[in-house]
Amino acid sequence: MIDVRPFNQLGGAHHGWLQAKHHFSFADYYDPKRVGWGNLLVWNDDTIAAGTGFPPHPHRDMEIITYVRDGAITHEDNLGNKGRTVAGDVQVMSAGTGVVHSEYNLEPETTRIFQIWIMPDQKGHKPSWGTRTFPKGDRSGHFVVLASGQDNDNDALKIHADARVLGANLKNGEETEYSLGRERKAYLVVAKGRVEVNGKIINERDGAAVDDTDILKFKSFEDSEVVLVDVNE
C-alpha cells in the first residue's frame, strides 16, 4: 500500500522567518490519521529565512535527523558541539538524557531542510551530535544509507533506533529499487523532481506512506532527489 500525501494538503505554520509544512501531526497541527508512521514521528519541511533560525531550546529521548535541501544550517549545543551542514548533507542529534541546541541559517540566502524525528530504541542514551558529507555523485542512480541504527550500515551516521534514512539522486528516466519487506514501513519525500513508485506518481515535496510492500520500484520523470525513511512497525 502506498498513500501519496500531496504537498498542498499538508498541515503547516508560517512564522515570518519560518515557513513549515508538517507531514505528521506537530505543534498546533493535529490530524488523527497522521500521527507518526511506525517509530517515525515527525517529518517537517522547513524554509528558513536568511539570518534567522531556532534559538536555544531543549530536547530529550529523540533521534533528530536534519537533511539540508538548500543553503546550510549551523548547529550549536550545550555539549560543546558546533558545526555547519550544507545542502545534500546530513546531521544527526541524539537527544538522549537531554540537550539544549540552536539551529541557525547564517547564510545570505534561504535554507530549506527536512527535519525528521524518530523514536529511540530506549530512553536514556548519552546525548550526541554529528554531521557528515554525502556527495550526491555517490548516490547517483541508487539509494545510499545516510543515518542508521542497524549494525551493518557502517558508513552511515549512527542513530539509536530501528530505522534507516536513505537518499537517492535519479536522472531523468532512471530507475532503481529498494527492498523494504512487508514487515517494515517506509515514508518517502521527493525533495526535487518527480518520480513514479510502484505505479504511483509522487511530485516534488509530496510524501508517501508505504506498508505491506516488499520492493519499491522507482522511475524518475526528471532529475530527482528522493529521501526515504525505513522504520519498524
Image (spheres, rainbow, N blue to C red):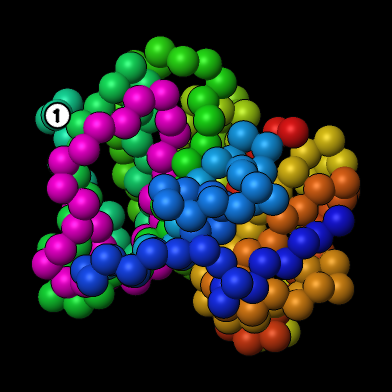
Q: Is residue 84 visible?
A: no
Instruction: Describe the element under mark 1 as helix, strand or loop.
Output: loop
| Disc 1 residue type (three-letter) | Asn
Q: Residues within 10 Å of mark 1 (few under 14, many from 20)?
A: few
- Prevailing secondary structure class for the magenta stretch in the rendered image: strand
**Residue 3 placement, left or right of 35:** right
The residue shown at (78%, 68%) is 197
Is 115 rendered above or below residue 97? below
Most foreground residue, 102 or 71: 102
**Residue 48 placement, left or right of 136:** left
- Asked if the stretch drawn in magenta spans residue 50, the answer is yes
Q: Percent from the top left, x then y, of residue 107? A: 15, 69
Quadrant for the N terminus in the image:
bottom right
Q: Residue furthest top?
A: 124
Is 200 rendered above or below residue 122? below
* Residue 162 position by quadrant: top right
Q: Percent from the top left, x then y, of residue 89? A: 38, 57
Q: Is residue 100 visible?
A: yes
Residue topped by disc 1: 78
The residue shown at (46%, 15%) is 123
Is 199 rendered above or below residue 44? below
Most foreground residue, 54 or 213: 54
The residue shown at (20%, 32%) is 100
Q: Percent from the top left, x then y, of residue 94? A: 38, 30
| Magenta segment boundaries in residue numbering | 49-74
Q: Percent from the top left, x then y, of residue 51? A: 12, 67
Quadrant for the C terminus in the image:
top right
- Asked if the stretch drawn in magenta spans residue 71, the answer is yes
The residue shown at (47%, 41%) is 117
The total of numbered circles placed on residues is 1
